[in-house]
Image (tube, helix red, strand yellow):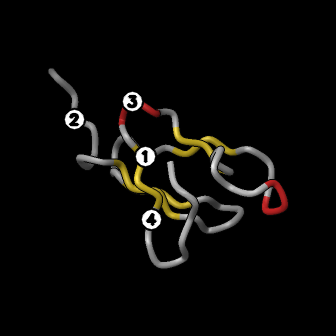
Amino acid sequence: MATPNPTEPVSVDPKNLPVFCPNPDMPLWSSHPRVFLDIAETGETMCPYCGTRYRLKGGPLTSGH
């Protein structure tokens, strides 16, 4: 994961699921309570605390059924 940029979403590799914020690359001073974010269905999500946007590489996960 990368440090957030207000205009660019943080790119998340599917192998790094589940997504949580603040992510490990964020500075300690910007911390808020850890929240897990649902990204698999839509491919994108936003943190309700800090507004950081996350985008899943490859888009939404699809079921193999």
- Relative depth, front residue between 65 and 31: 31
Q: Distance of mark 1 from mark 3, alpha carbons?
A: 13 Å
Q: Earlier in the sequence, mark 4 or mark 1?
A: 4
Q: Position of residue 32 (x, y in %)?
A: 80, 55
* Residue that badge 2 annotates: 62
* Residue that badge 4 annotates: 9
Q: Earlier in the sequence, mark 3 or mark 4?
A: 4
The secondary structure type at the circle numbered 2 is loop
Amino acid on which the number 4 mark rests in the picture: Pro
Q: Quick check: 42 above or below 15?
A: below
Q: Position of residue 38 (x, y in %)?
A: 49, 43
Q: Circles 3 and 2: CB distance less than 8 Å? A: no
Q: Earlier in the sequence, mark 1 or mark 3?
A: 3
For disc 2, the neighbor class at 10 Å (few under 14, some 14 to 19, many from 20) is: few
Q: Nearer the viewer, mark 4 or mark 1?
A: 4
Amino acid on which the number 3 mark rests in the picture: Lys
Q: Position of residue 51 (x, y in %)?
A: 61, 68
Say which mark, if any, is on residue 39.
1
